[in-house]
Amino acid sequence: MIAQEPTLKNRPEFINVRIKRQNGPGQEPYWELHKIKYEPEMNVISVLQRIAAQATTVDGKRVTPVTWDCGCLEEVCGACTMVVNGRVRQSCSALVDRLLADNPDEIVLEPMSKFPVIRDLMVDRERLFRGLQRVKGWVPVDSYYDMGPGERQLRDTQEQNYPLSQCMSCGCCLEACPQFLKIEVPRKEGETDEQYEARKYAEYDKGFVGANAISQVMLFNNHPTGKALAKERLDALTGPGGIATCGNAQNCVAVCPKEIPLTTSIARAGRATTVHAIKKWFER
Amino acid sequence: MAEKRVAVVGGGLAGLASVMKLTELGVKVDLFSLTPVKRSHSVCAQGGINSCNDQTRQLGDSEWKHFDDTVYGGDFLNHQPPVKEMAMWAPKVIDLMDRLGVPFNRTGEGFIDRRRFGGTLYKRTAFAGATTGQQLLYALDEQVRRQEAEGMVRKYEFWDFLRPILDEQGNCRGIVAQDMVSMEIRSFPADAAVMATGGCGLVYGRSTMSVFCNGSAASRCFQAGAKYANGEFIQVHPTAIPGADKLRLMSESARGEGGRVWVPRKAQDPRAPQEIPDSDRYYFLEERYPEYGNLVPRDIATREIFDICVNEGLSVEDDRMCVYLDLTHIPAAELDRKLGGILEIYEKFQGVDPRVEPMKIFPAVHYSMGGLWADYVKSSDNGLEPGAPENHMTNIPGLYAIGECDYHYHGGNRLGANSLLSCIFTGLFTGPSIVNYIDSQPHDAVSQELLDSARQAEVDRHQHLLTGNEGSQENPYLIHQELGDLMTRVATVVRKNDQLSEALVKVDELHQRAMKVNLSDTGGWTNQNVLFAKALQDMFPLAKCILKGALQRDECRGAHYKPDFQKPPLTAEDPAERRRQAEAWCDEFEANNERYLKSTIATWNADTMQPDLTYEDVDTSSIPPRPRLYGLVGADIIEEVWKERAKAKAEAGQYATT
């Protein structure tokens, strides 16, 4: 039922899939070529499922199934981000017919390069969630009891907030960002969970927080109760790894699968932090 | 006193709501999830969340009517006290989520906008575009992150729940879980454990559910002695996009916003849908169900679409089954505002713009209405007793079940936009119950021996899977495919006893084969192969509950439909004869309820590797059961007879007590 690409006249019998694999953190990556039968309506997930079931490379060598991360397969959960044919995207919505139209010879799958590889195509994106903690991305309500409805909101406000609230923390914007650099913190021997986490977070907090978190600041600062923490969030953005790090490359907005107006958020956050800094200077 | 600590397994709406409430009550929580909780399957819920509201109230709606719609829609299989409590709480849940920042769609004046969903005549459903589940989940995720920053929550993401730890008295004292990255298996002591692990769609291979919804956590509790109830009630959603890797949901909200379902009157009409004039279109739901139209309850819509394709041969395509779901008559701007999210999914995965061309859709497995059996305490007004420790506790003391993985609220068929409500409601409502349970316990430390032996059992299982089946050729992925195909064929829309019996034998075979899988990856780092094999093995006990439960239930109720036991419509034209038929119909209905208006309760028998089934009466203390008559010929006269009988019964009851 997928509308087939008209340019792709002769459907291949087989598809070549080249995968960049890595057995664990700190290990050398290597390439592996798999060949699977072409079926109509495949996406990269079904390609990986076929490879898992067959677990044999093109030259007949038995190998372990490729490890990857996925969840909903409808582009809402954000789990299956990877680099497909050189472009970061969700692998569930990467349709094979389209990929073959671009490159009929093979499909190339790589893990994201800005996050530590766990194994093969699976990466550790904890830093992304730590970023949300860093900017206090929540509404600080008093309690979870029934206190009646929230404040009335204009449709305009809802329509401004809704797209920002669709961010699924997939990490595409970070992969594409020239200022977001990989931070890998290997665990030391004898370290407890708590010690390791503290050390890791300290490292993460020095790095650029990224477009997704900046956009969340604008979302919560635009909420009637959320804005109670507006100053703290802007403080977080004025510090090291904050908004000043952004080089305005605009790559983030170009790759966002949810078309979230990230650069608009960044511009608004830039203005807000400037005003905030001046105010603070006067309050001294 | 020692620090109170609860293990919550599952980070969807129910799990997160539970964590949020427990931490507010001062309890520390260890939260376990197969995936970062922000990616839990709740993000996929699209349409909305129900509650009686200021607008519907003025049209005569009430919490009671929401309660009644849920019970009637569920074909009276729901225990009524929990449903009543949920309906009463619904407006509070919406208010809280609004306060937490969920961007619900607004009316021009700034109030929360509402839409209609199936099985009701009121606009009860609050929504945030067509990604309501995502927005609700994020709001709860944010609160839990806030609690995490406060030091109240430890998140164990990419951890697989393996078993509850039971002490000599049979109380739950913690859980065993496995790190999916390092493969480390560890025991976690806890004062109570909460299962909030969702449905078991993966038993059917392809469904609308996420890959995490494999049912294995519920199955592991079941195999450890927890009861499993109403397994055979699996909802098949009427509208989904068929796909090779999964079936993608097309929300009921598409119909709630005016979407129309139709097929060309001529089989496989070669014209493009837009070129087919109205007179050549068969809007079968609107014709067959004038009152509810496209918004009949899901079980009805599913069967009608199935019927149109299979029995009437009117599928839009000749080589595969589908019907049109048409939104093209609605202005594109309005569609984008209210349904943007799902239209994008269709566009992205099908390459067709549903604003211009009708979508092609077909039913798909969607929701497990059955699940872990859970207790409750009824209050004096036939709701739930707040704070009673038994609320949502399984038959294992200290082990709770909430959300989709328990069996309450939805009965034989779930009303749209009630699932999000039931998840958040159970998460919030059970908080004080769990705290009261913990406070009633002696609080002695869990013995190290107990923790070690539970852990060791799982280490052994893991090790056996890696190396125990040398020489075997069984591949877990291929067995899973076979299981899914079989279950989809025999245990979805239409069920037949001979097929179910055959399937039970076949599933037994597959189960034995699955216990002997040989893995291509025997490594000790992020071994998804072995985790999948384990999950696969644990799908079988649930698959057997579904099949055996369906086999033994010789009737039609909600999502469970056996044509061989369907009650025929009235045939007589003569009023007196018609009346007599209606009387007979009602007699039969009563007799059937006598026999089958019961929850199926399964217990696992490890010796036979089969579930043993017993039955439990349904609490119908608030609303007496009545026939569910959508679209039946003669429904009017049957209803008349039924009302007379009900009245007579009520009067008889009155005389008896005075």
Image (cartoon, coloured by chain):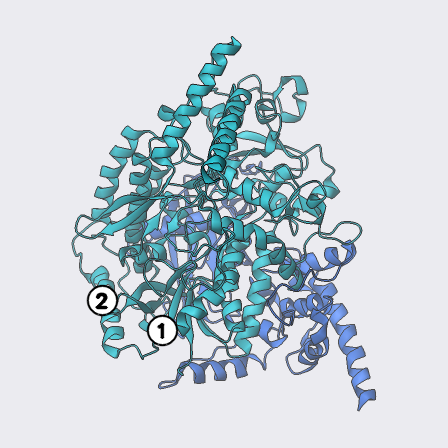
Chain colours: A blue, B cyan
Marks 2 and 1 sit apart, C-alpha to C-alpha, by 26 Å
Q: Which mark is residue A92?
A: none
Q: Position of residue B73 (x, y in %)?
A: 51, 38
Which residue type carries mark 2? Ala
Q: Is residue A127 visible?
A: no
Q: Earlier in the sequence, mark 2 or mark 1?
A: 1
Callout 1 secondary element = loop
- Which quarter shows the N terminus of chain B? bottom left
Q: In the image, what residue occupies the spot 53% across and 82% down?
A: A203
Residue in the picture at 48% in, 50% down: B81
Residue B428 position, x and y percent, is 52, 62
Q: Is residue A79 above or below residue B262?
A: below
Q: Position of residue B338 (x, y in %)?
A: 68, 46
Q: Left or right: B90 with respect to A79?
A: right
Where residue A212 sits: x, y (%)?
63, 66
Q: Amino acid at mark 1?
A: Gln
Residue that carries the numbered disc 2 in the rendered image = B457
Q: Which mark is residue B441?
A: 1
